[in-house]
Amino acid sequence: MTSLRNIASLVAAITILQLAQGLMGVYLPLAMSADRLQGAAIGFVGAMYSAGFMAGAWYGPMMLARVGHIRVFSAAAAIVTASTLCLAGANDAISWGVLRGIMGFSVAFVFISVDSWMSISVAREERGGVMGVYQVLTKAALTLGPFLAFGAIPGAAGPLMIAGALQALAIVPISLTSKAQPAPPSAQPLALREQFNVAPAAVTASFFAGFVNAGVMTLAPLYAVEHFGVAQATTFQAAAFAGSLILQWPAGKLSDRVDRRLVIAGLSGMAALAAFALALFGPRLGFAAAAALFALWGAGALSFYGLAVAHMADRAEPGRIAQAASGLLFVWAAGSIAGPLLLGLAVEAAGRNAMFWFAGLSGAALVAFMLYRRTERTQAETTRKDSMAPATATSVAAADLAYGGEDAPDGIAPPPIEGKGAG
């Protein structure tokens, strides 16, 4: 694919970065536990990362318009590297939270710069194939990343050094690319109320993706340590990513053929059932069965976000896909602040098993809302939808690359399809 060759350096950079993200996903909860942080404190640290990410999603487009893609990526990745290495000196909730907030802010800049670049460089007719390669590589990196911390003592500096090295290396493909960077875009306000009016199901699903997944994925390694031992924490965490890697693409293709809200409801329902099963029987099932259920939870819970972005893109006006995608990124981050805080309090009050009751009830609520929105339609939606490709919550603006469409909400005439670019 010509487009894939044009963005090979971007895909390589994000894949390397996601290896570090996968490693940190297992290391950080165990390190905070070694520092005697409890559920609420760990939830606070997770919320600080999401708050930083939300701020980065808000200010990132303005910085991109000011200095350009390569400079934003390089500076942000350097800050991520430095803050990761500084975590070795963190020993209380405040220091952990401040450093994670800085990391979240910088990571948002990284993904905004890459995804904006990709949206301009990929031809419309090649979006599906290019995004398929992009998502397989980045999901595989998230799945493999936790194993880089295998056998490490909780709180040891070694995993942080590995993560910092990977984050620094991610700058290399971007800095040495022979492809010219796009012209800096013009910044647009997010207009969140307008986006909710256009696609309330997309906004709500994005919020729930952050609200549930951020907290569960933060506390999952601690759950595994408590019930199955330290050696199993890495495999348990990776199981959720592996489940989403397997199911995300088929779910996306199905959503090209039926109402995306129904597919979101199905995925969320599957995740809710798996969460309830873990809440009721998890520790008694043994590690293999519990990991399989967690993989089933991940297949549902970690896959519907991309469908929410696609649903928004189906309905957004031409030229506003990037704004809509950034808005969903902001909403996801807002959910990622509230979720870990509430889940941390629940875990302190009722034990770590409460995380799966929380996930199950939240998933059931999302199913109910999706079905409600489905029944609210006043006329059949018969306009053509563009092919869907999955998007991750840490790379939300990739929707601008992956999705375009003309499926307008009730009462709004569908916009014309643009020939290429932002959709």
Image (cartoon, rainbow, N blue to C red):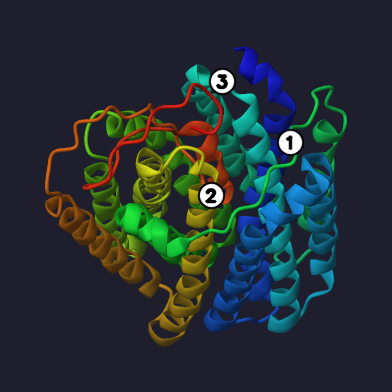
Name the residue that disc number 3 marks. Answer: 123
Q: Residue 365 at x, y = what percent?
A: 24, 65
Mark 2 is on which residue type?
A: Gln
Q: Based on the displayed image, in which of its 4 quarters is residue 104 positioned? A: bottom right
At horizontal 30% and vertical 30% (from top left) the residue drawn is 256
Distance (Cα) linking label 3 and label 1: 20 Å
Pick the front one: 290 or 108: 108
Residue 99: mark:
none
Q: Residue 45 at x, y = what percent?
A: 63, 74
Secondary structure under the numbered disc 1 in the rendered image: helix
Which numbered disc flags the more N-terminal residue, 2 or 1? 1
Q: Is residue 113 left or right of residue 140?
A: right
Q: Is residue 92 left or right of residue 177?
A: left
- In the image, is residue 162 above or below residue 154? above
At horizontal 79% and vertical 75% (from top left) the residue drawn is 90
Name the residue that disc number 1 marks. Answer: 13
- In the image, is residue 109 above or below residue 90? above
Which numbered disc flags the more N-terminal residue, 3 or 1? 1
Pick the front one: 34 or 89: 89
Q: Residue 167: in sight, yes or no?
A: no
Mark 1 is on which residue type?
A: Ala
Closer to viewer: mark 2 or mark 1: 2
